[in-house]
Image: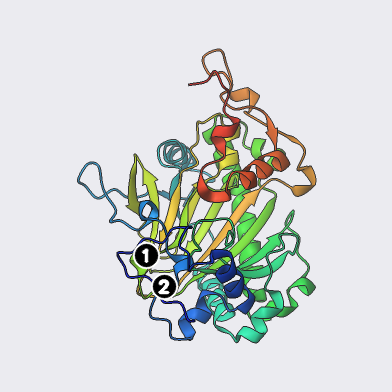
């Protein structure tokens, strides 16, 4: 018997007798067609495996002060000479107060950015038979495509498809990308520019912390890059689901390239605020590892992506994280930042231990940082 979808006012719970969630998740996953496949099939309702609990559903952005708040914009023009002090101060203030900032005049050509977004779009819009070749949930595969990364762990699936390129320590052989040729050249060109930009940002962030300019690069804390291309199809009932659930990033720094559609929201002072796309800009946000090593000075902030009736929305996130060859290396508050008045508030850990804790606590359901907070810190 064909199951019908609930009405908008009906709340699905795990105890629904006619709803075998795991079975429906498995059936959906086995199609390897993703959310794009649902849309192409003519779906006019959101399947219940995508319906989020009421407390996580979409709500209009709110502003505590009744004014239009905007993510700080950092202009890198002249950062090597005349404007370096201003740029560093801007990054410091944004990292402490927001955990997010838009970067303009960053040196990545606009055509490279546009080609990267277009490459993601082309990959996801090609025939399912082609995409199936790289469909996988195996994190060991350095090039893979899937729908809703936490499909079997979250309470509800998310309305997006994803393609991943793992540049471990900046290296990824072109041969590993045979089945994604339609996107390979664009992402490789983009990664070259990101590699140059991250060197400059590591210097600026180091100086923003009052450290020598080569401090962060010397720790290899941003040596590995994971480039992720998200495809958020138009949704027939966007109020019932989310593109990405609220979370903070498992990285030192994340650089986001996005198209004009919007939908990203940042949690600022207990209110969800829209991040308005800026043409030609990259959005930077502090990750969990950066908050940990800066002893809470720089903030890793929760954010989410709403679903929309207009689409597709395309974005490319680059997660900068420590070298995986040093996954057992100690990871803790930078000693040069500590003092009697600023004692450590986080325990020392390692990349492997932090990731294991992240996965054992429901993935993106809650932040992992509190699990490493000192018991006697406020």
Q: Is residue 72 visible?
A: no
Q: Please say if the residues under marks 1 and 2 sit with CB atoms less than 8 Å apart.
A: yes
Task: Please tell me whether mark 2 sits on a helix, a strand or a loop.
Answer: loop
Q: Nearer the viewer, residue 280 or 277?
A: 277
Q: Nearer the viewer, residue 350 or 31?
A: 31
Horizontal side, residue 70 vs residue 208: left or right? left
* Identity of the residue drawn at 70% across and 61% down: 166
Mark 1–mark 2 Cα distance, whole angstroms, equals 7 Å
* Identity of the residue drawn at 48% across and 64% down: 17
Q: Position of residue 306 (x, y in %)?
A: 39, 62
Q: Is residue 136 above or below residue 94?
A: below
Q: Nearer the viewer, residue 34 or 78?
A: 34
Residue 328 location, quadrant: top right
Residue 53 location, quadrant: bottom left
Task: Please tell me whether mark 1 sits on a helix, a strand or a loop.
Answer: helix
Q: Is residue 25 visible?
A: yes
Q: Residue furthest left?
A: 66
Q: Position of residue 237 (x, y in %)?
A: 35, 71
Q: Position of residue 176 (x, y in %)?
A: 77, 71
Residue 336 marker: none
Residue 240 marker: 1
Q: Nearer the viewer, residue 155 or 210?
A: 155
Horizontal side, residue 70 vs residue 43: left or right? left
* Badge 2: residue crowd in 10 Å (few <14, some 14–19, many ≥20): many
Q: Residue furthest top?
A: 340
Q: Earlier in the sequence, mark 1 or mark 2?
A: 2
Q: Is residue 190 above or below residue 271?
A: below
Q: Position of residue 177 (x, y in %)?
A: 73, 74
Q: Which residue is mark 2?
A: 46
* Identity of the residue drawn at 67% across and 75% down: 184
């Amino acid at each position: 018997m064909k199951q019908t979808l609930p009405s908008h006012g009906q709340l699905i719970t795990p105890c629904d007798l006619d709803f075998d969630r795991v079975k429906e998740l498995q059936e959906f996953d086995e199609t390897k067609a993703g959310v794009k496949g649902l849309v192409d099939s003519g779906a006019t309702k959101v399947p219940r495996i995508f319906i989020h609990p009421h407390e996580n559903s979409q709500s209009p952005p709110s502003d505590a002060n009744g004014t239009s708040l905007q993510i700080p914009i950092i202009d890198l023009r002249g950062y090597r000479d005349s404007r370096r002090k201003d740029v560093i101060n801007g990054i410091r203030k944004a990292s402490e107060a927001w955990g997010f900032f838009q970067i303009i005049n960053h040196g990545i050509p606009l055509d490279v950015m546009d080609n990267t977004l277009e490459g993601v779009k082309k990959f996801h819009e090609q025939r399912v038979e082609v995409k199936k070749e790289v469909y996988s949930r195996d994190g060991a595969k350095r090039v893979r495509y899937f729908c809703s990364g936490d499909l079997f762990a979250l309470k509800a699936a998310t309305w997006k498809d994803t393609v991943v390129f793992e540049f471990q320590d900046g290296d990824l052989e072109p041969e590993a990308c045979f089945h994604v040729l339609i996107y390979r050249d664009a992402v490789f060109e983009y990664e070259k520019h990101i590699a140059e930009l991250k060197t400059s940002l590591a210097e600026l962030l180091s100086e923003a912390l009052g450290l020598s300019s080569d401090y962060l690069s010397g720790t290899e804390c941003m040596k590995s890059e994971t480039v992720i291309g998200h495809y958020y199809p138009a949704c027939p009932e966007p109020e019932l689901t989310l593109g990405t659930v609220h979370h903070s990033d498992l990285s030192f720094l994340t650089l986001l390239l996005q198209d004009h559609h919007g939908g990203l929201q940042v949690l600022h002072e207990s209110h969800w605020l829209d991040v308005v796309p800026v043409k030609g800009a990259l959005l930077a946000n502090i990750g969990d590892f950066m908050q940990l090593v800066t002893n809470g000075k720089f903030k890793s902030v929760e954010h989410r992506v709403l679903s929309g009736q207009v689409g597709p929305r395309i974005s490319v996130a680059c997660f900068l994280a420590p070298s995986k060859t040093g996954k057992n290396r100690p990871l803790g508050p930078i000693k040069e930042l500590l003092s009697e008045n600023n004692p450590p508030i986080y325990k020392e850990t390692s990349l492997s231990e932090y990731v294991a804790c992240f996965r054992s606590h429901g993935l993106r359901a809650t932040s992992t940082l509190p699990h490493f907070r000192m018991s006697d810190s406020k």
